[in-house]
Image (cartoon, rainbow, N blue to C red):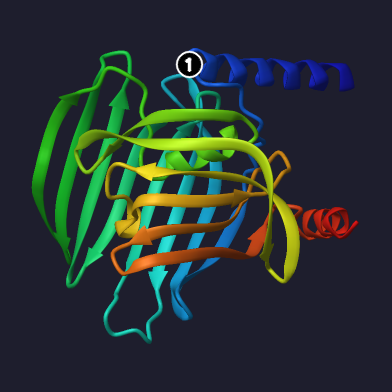
Amino acid sequence: MRKRILILYILLFTIAVNGLHAQGYPPPVYKWQVGEELSYTVRWSFLHLGRLVLQVLNADTLSGRPVYHCRIHIDSNPSLPFINLHDIYDSFIDSAGFYSHIFISYEGKGDHLIYTRYDFDYEKNSVHMQIENRKGNHSIVELDSTGAIHKKVQDSLSLLYFARAMAHNKAKLTVPVFAYNKLDSTQINFRDKLSKIKTNDHKIKTLFLDGRLKFVGIAGVKQDFKGWFSTDEQAVPLKANMKAFVGNVTLELDEWKYWGGDSVFVDLKDKVDK
């Protein structure tokens, strides 16, 4: 039984490596964890803007390909009168290639909801785009169209998991991203260097990357960004600096499930102190 499990792990790792090599990317160092839930405080200077929760909901299969259903919740601080965000974004991400198969968003806009769905068909080099304006029990179709794509792409959420998978590498990559009905890109510089930061009341070593979004992403995120990730195989985002519609914001991990964060923080802190 143990031998069979070992062979299965080797096969899965080989599939993951080949999946990204086929796209011209370096090999990943990443471990999927169903049930993982990461919660972040979002701040603008000393002002608490809200919270962000990142989840790996389950493993699934789409057209014979194993995928992971991931979700991000964004909720603004209810005490702030100038911002009102309560959005949900879903992505079905290829388990080996870390690219998007389906992207769905639910964005609140005052008294109505904007529903967006992208279905990527890489065999037909196409993407089906659907946008609806929903209010109560009524729905108005704003867009129902098919466009051409000629490469595997990221969406606004799968891009984060791609970055996690690549965080242990050293590479400068231009990554294709499909967002807001068009194909764009993101420049990511994987530095392959340890960077010390203070987060969650610990001073620890992290994997550092930076880059530039060439599109406006989730919650108005845009332009330059910096990220610090844990050095274990889950490569958990610990802290990020980026630009949003209100200015420069900081995201910092403060709660988690299905990640050995307590031991990681302690182990890394001991190494830094020594």
Horizontal side of residue 148 vs 67, given as left or right = left
Horizontal side of residue 189 vs 12, given as left or right = left
Question: Where does the N terminus fall, quadrant-wise?
Answer: top right
Mark 1 lies on residue? 24
Residue 99 visible to an observer of this rendering? no
Q: How many marks?
A: 1
Position of residue 183 relative to residue 260, above or below, is above
Horizontal side of residue 17 vs 129, given as left or right = right
Position of residue 132 relative to residue 201, above or below, is above
Under tag 1, what secondary structure? loop
Q: Nearer the viewer, residue 187 or 69?
A: 187
| Residue at the image position 37 percent from the left and 82 percent from the top | 78
| Residue 4 lies in quadrant | top right
| Residue 257 lies in quadrant | bottom right
| Residue at the image position 8 percent from the left and 47 percent from the top | 142
Q: Nearer the viewer, residue 217 or 124?
A: 217
Q: Could you say where residue 167 lies in the image, as x and y percent from the top left? A: 60, 37
Q: Could you say where residue 32 lies in the image, as x and y percent from the top left? A: 63, 38
Q: Could you say where residue 16 lies in the image, as x and y percent from the top left? A: 60, 21
Position of residue 190 relative to residue 228, above or below, is above
| Residue at the image position 47 percent from the left and 19 percent from the top | 64
Q: Could you say where residue 117 lies in the image, as x and y percent from the top left? A: 26, 42
Position of residue 105 relative to residue 120, above or below, is below
Question: Where does the C terminus fall, quadrant-wise?
Answer: bottom right
Q: Residues within 10 Å of mark 1 (few under 14, many from 20)?
A: few
Q: Amino acid at mark 1?
A: Gly
Horizontal side of residue 83 vs 136, given as left or right = right
Residue 222 visible to an observer of this rendering? yes
